[in-house]
Amino acid sequence: MEKESKFSWKKRGKAFIYAWQGFKALLRYEHNARIHLVAAVVAICAGIIFGISAVEWCVVVMCIGLVIAAEALNSAVEALADKISPDYDPLIGRAKDLGATAVTLLALVAAAVGCIVYLPYIIRWFS
């Protein structure tokens, strides 16, 4: 049976430090994460420029968070897979492909949401 540990603010603080280190590593080593971050900055700037509603902000921020989180999870799966099996393995390949599919699907959904949210503003801007 596992020993129950007491709550520790120090341990919670360290968890945020580890998460920040992971985010920095994600941006440093993963090219696609940098692309997603640029897209997020563009979406945020567009939201500010167009003055999107609170509900639209919620949807945009959720999409940004989901895509970047999926990229982080996919990168973690790929790193573990490469450690476990440096040589080609069809099951490892399938796991990596599925992770990439998850990120791609979320990115496509985020792009569709971006079109739904921003296209009316863009059309009004130019008309």
Image: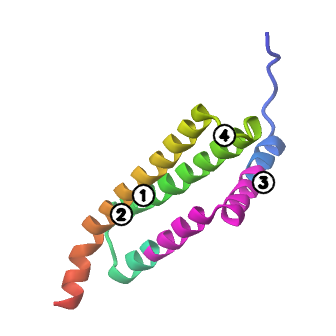
Taking the magenta stretch, the answer to whether it contains residue 105 is no
Image coordinates for residue 80, horizontal then vertical, percent:
71, 40
Give the secondary structure at mark 1: helix
Which residue position is annotated with label 2? 111
Pair 3/4: label in front = 4
The residues colored magenta run 18-42
Residue at position x 25%, y 78% in the image: 121
The mark lying in front, picked from 4 and 1, is: 4
- Per the image, the residue denoted by label 4 is 88
**Picture coordinates of residue 110, whole percent (x, y):** 38, 59
Which of 39/90 is in front? 90
Q: Which residue is mark 3?
A: 17
Q: Is residue 119 above or below residue 1?
A: below
- The dominant secondary structure in magenta is helix
Give the mark, 2 or 3, whose residue is nearer the N terminus. 3
On the picture, is 72 further left or further right than 113?
Answer: right
Give left or right: position of 62 versus 73: left
| Numbered badge on residue 107 | 1
